[in-house]
Image (spheres, rainbow, N blue to C red):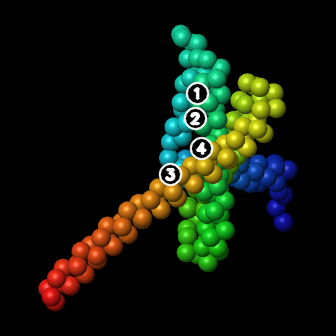
Amino acid sequence: MGKVSVYTPIAYIVLLVSALALFSTVYRRRKVRRLISLAPWFGSHLQRDIYITLKNQNDPKVPEKMLEAALLRRAAENVRRIMSLQESKPSLAELHQRGAVGDDVWTRFLAAEKIMDAEVMECAGEANAIKPGWAQVMFQSAAEIVHNDKIHERLALVSERHQKEKERMEALRSQAAAELELEK
């Protein structure tokens, strides 16, 4: 039997480790590219952009109350988005388990959850920077704002339905009156 050099197993191990490292690097890059190419779950965050613009404005210094109001609006939008995610998660998870929804949609959803977690933490940090301990009060107020907005939307729908029903009843009343006039 021929002699095997001492360097042969070492070369084999180096080759194996290099191949695994290369595979790992390529796999992670592809995964990152795929995640970056996914469309965001929510559109642009206008309230966050407004707050950041006001916070970074130095020429005329923005009043503290205006910053607080912008941050409160930002928190309200975050609460809206979180509520939307919480409402969608059970049904989306079930659809994903059944195979009705692809992995890309589920990945987008999970990424949106992580983004919203980071956004809430950033918003809480900003609130505590303005007033220590204000984050909890701010998010309670934001939840109340969202709840109030939903009530106003429902009232507007009821008012709209009332108006349509009123018009329909007027049309029926005039039609019935016209039929009675024809019978006389």
* Comes first in the chain, label 1 or label 3: 3
Residue found 15% across the figure and 88% down from its top: 184
Judge left or right: residue 35 versus residue 134.
left
Amino acid type at mark 2: Arg
Q: Nearer the viewer, mark 3 or mark 4?
A: 4
Q: Name the residue carrying label 1.
A: 52
- x and y percentages locating residue 35 in the rendered image: 57, 51
The residues tagged by marks 1 and 3 sit, at their Cα atoms, a distance apart of 23 Å
Residue found 42% across the figure and 64% down from its top: 162
| View extreme (top): residue | 59
* Comes first in the chain, label 2 or label 4: 2
The residues tagged by marks 1 and 4 sit, at their Cα atoms, a distance apart of 14 Å
- SS label for mark 1: helix
- SS label for mark 3: loop
Which mark, residue 77? 4
Amino acid type at mark 3: Ala
- Which image quarter: residue 126? top right
Judge left or right: residue 19 versus residue 31.
right
Residues under numbered marks 1 and 4 in contact, where contact means CB atoms less than 8 Å apart: no
The residues tagged by marks 3 and 2 sit, at their Cα atoms, a distance apart of 19 Å
Which mark, residue 48? 2
Residue 171 visible: yes
Residues under numbered marks 2 and 4 in contact, where contact means CB atoms less than 8 Å apart: yes
